[in-house]
Image: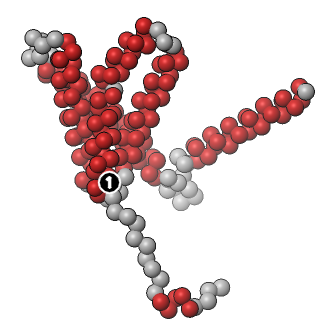
């Protein structure tokens, strides 16, 4: 019985290793020095840049609007700051879409941000459980993470859907259909 359980544990480890190897192989280079999956590398890099841009937009908006909005209730002030920072960050992060030839990059970069947000939410739920600390975290999450991630993903999806052209398959000339290839 113990030997059979050990084999299944070894099989589980082998499967995990194979899955991890297949995931990380996308980030490795080919023999020619080119990345195997440039889309993953580019969108991951863009997502890090987008996260920094959203952070800086929040930082600037908080510095600029805190004093003028001090007469409002806290929720009103927070709402205006969150919406303003999210709009500025979304505009800034969606701007490269107009310069990139591959229209998937900005949208997939925002999908990485959605994945980060979901991972952070799950990790904090595991760490804090359903306690008051998690409720406080959710308040922070609702003001600082959900608005920019949602606005950026929605705007970049609309841009992607508008500008994405379906792949055009080159049809073979008529004469190639009748030539046998060996």
165 left or right, relative to 76 = right
For the N terminus, the image quarter is top right
Q: Position of residue 84 (x, y in %)?
A: 18, 29
- Relative to 104, does residue 117 appear above or below in the rendering? above
- Relative to 116, does residue 40 appear above or below in the rendering? below
Q: Secondary structure at mark 1?
A: helix
170 left or right, relative to 155 = right
- Relative to 64, does residue 154 appear above or below in the rendering? below
**What crowding class fits label 1: few (fewer than 14 Cα within 10 Å), some (14-19), or many (20 or more)?**
few
114 left or right, relative to 93 = right
At 56% from the left edge and 91% from the top edge, which residue is drawn? 178
Q: Quadrant of residue 50?
A: top left
Q: Position of residue 80 (x, y in %)?
A: 17, 23
Nearest the camera: 131 or 56? 131
Nearest the camera: 164 or 22? 164
Please give the residue where the numbered disc 1 appears in the rendered image.
161
At 49% from the left edge and 18% from the top edge, which residue is drawn? 125
Q: Quadrant of residue 73?
A: top left
* Residue 45 shows in this picture: no
* Residue 161 shows in this picture: yes
14 left or right, relative to 145 = right
Nearest the camera: 129 or 109? 129
Q: Position of residue 140 (x, y in %)?
A: 33, 18
Q: Position of residue 151 (x, y in %)?
A: 28, 36
At 68% from the left edge and 37% from the top edge, which residue is drawn? 16
At 36% from the left edge and 50% from the top edge, which residue is drawn? 105
For the C terminus, the image quarter is bottom right
Residue at the top extreme, as displayed: 132
């Amino acid at each position: 019985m113990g030997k059979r359980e050990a084999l299944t544990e070894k099989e589980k480890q082998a499967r995990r290793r194979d899955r991890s190897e297949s995931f990380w192989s996308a980030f490795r280079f080919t023999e020619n020095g080119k990345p195997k999956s440039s889309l993953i590398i580019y969108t991951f890099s863009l997502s890090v840049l987008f996260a920094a841009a959203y952070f800086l937009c929040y930082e600037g908006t908080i510095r600029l609007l805190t004093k003028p909005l001090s007469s409002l209730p806290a929720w009103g002030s927070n709402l205006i700051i969150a919406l303003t920072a999210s709009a500025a960050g979304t505009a800034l992060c969606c701007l490269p879409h107009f310069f990139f030839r591959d229209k998937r990059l900005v949208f997939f970069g925002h999908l990485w941000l959605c994945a980060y947000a979901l991972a952070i939410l799950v990790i904090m739920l595991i760490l804090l459980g359903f306690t008051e600390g998690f409720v406080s975290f959710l308040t922070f999450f609702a003001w600082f993470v959900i608005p920019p991630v949602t606005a950026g993903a929605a705007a970049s999806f609309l841009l992607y859907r508008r500008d994405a052209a379906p792949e055009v398959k080159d049809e073979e000339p008529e004469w190639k259909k009748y030539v046998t290839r060996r």
